[in-house]
Amino acid sequence: KKYNELHLMKYIKNRITVIGMGYIGLPTALLLAHQNRKIICIDNDKKKIKDLKSGNLTLKEKSINLLFKKKRKYLNFSEKIEVSSTYIVCVPTPVKKQSKFLYKEDLSILNLIFKNLEKILKKNDLVVIESTCPPETASKFYNKIKKKFNFYLATCPERAMPGNTINEMINNYRVIGSSCDKTFEKTKKLYQLFVKGKIYKTGLTEAELIKLFENSYRDVNIGFANEIDTICKKYLINSKKIIKLSNFHPRVKIHEPGIGVGGHCIPVDPWFLIGKDKTRNNSVIYKSRILNLKKEDEIYNNLYKILNKKSKILFFGTTYKKNTEDMRNS
């Protein structure tokens, strides 16, 4: 009996459970997969799990497909979270529309994962949150569980770009927010299995904020570019020319204007930082988010003026950016 218990503990110690088989979870599992490690891949989408078990990959990105063919044999797919020693959480944290110009974070999926993990976590287990979260999400979860027993919690915001996912995950820098020094060392050792970029140490909330600031910066900059575009149109001037020449200045880097902001990160993450009613209107992040939403109205109104009800419209490119299959918030 003692031998069987030791054998079971050794078996569990080599297991890594990746929760969420989307744009981040599946590539992460593939990069970790090796003949000496057992990777458990979890998703509550029955069809997705069935397809993955059959070798059918819904993600069309070439580098992911090549890796899937090579490492699929090291992956085990399941709809339920199985006991491991390491858990990597890669589930969506979307926003819910409250009104035309107000969205609120929806952490229902993440909270369900936390609830399920709470039932099976053991002393000295490692949990890594890659999902993008509002500030203090990780610390609240950690403080709740550590009252019962000691475990290790880290936040390591995802690093990926649809169309270039594997390269980004391997070569980009990573930030690891950790509950203690030992957590950082354990998490760093885990990610060094495939990450070639530099790995930086922060606190749990610091890591969450870094991810939110990165995408909010881009949203604010795009908002500024869109406002430039609107101003230039009043004077019948080409905004792209103006921006190009402005960017010759060594300390200026204005983004390109567009028809709106798509994707899963830039139009979503800023809402995690936007405060309540009393502070919202003083937020440059909020004003930029609204400006970018209004840009869609501006484009629509301009089209409405020149089209009639019988007009046929052909869209060249329906994804949110070029060279990707990603339709989210397009």
Image: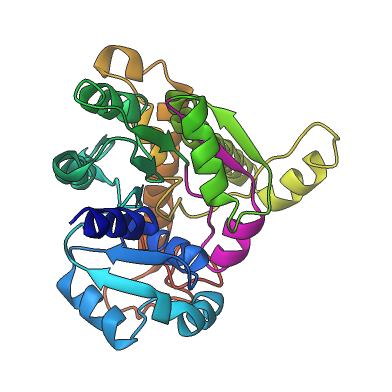
Query: Would you say residue 190 sits in the magenta stretch?
Result: no
Q: Nearer the viewer, residue 236 or 23?
A: 23
Res 51 quadrant in image:
bottom left
State left or right for residue 196 relative to residue 233: right
Q: Is residue 66 visible?
A: yes
- x and y, in percent, of residue 275 in the image: 32, 20
Q: Can you say whether 68 is above or below 162 in the image?
A: below
Q: Quadrant of the N terminus?
A: bottom left
Q: Which residues are magenta?
A: 157-179
State left or right for residue 300 relative to residue 323: left
Q: How many marks?
A: 0
State left or right for residue 242 relative to residue 135: right
Q: Can you say whether 176 is above or below 91 in the image?
A: above
Q: Which residue occupies 34% across, 13% down?
A: 279
Query: Would you say residue 166 sits in the magenta stretch?
Result: yes
Q: Which residue occupies 18% across, 63% down?
A: 44
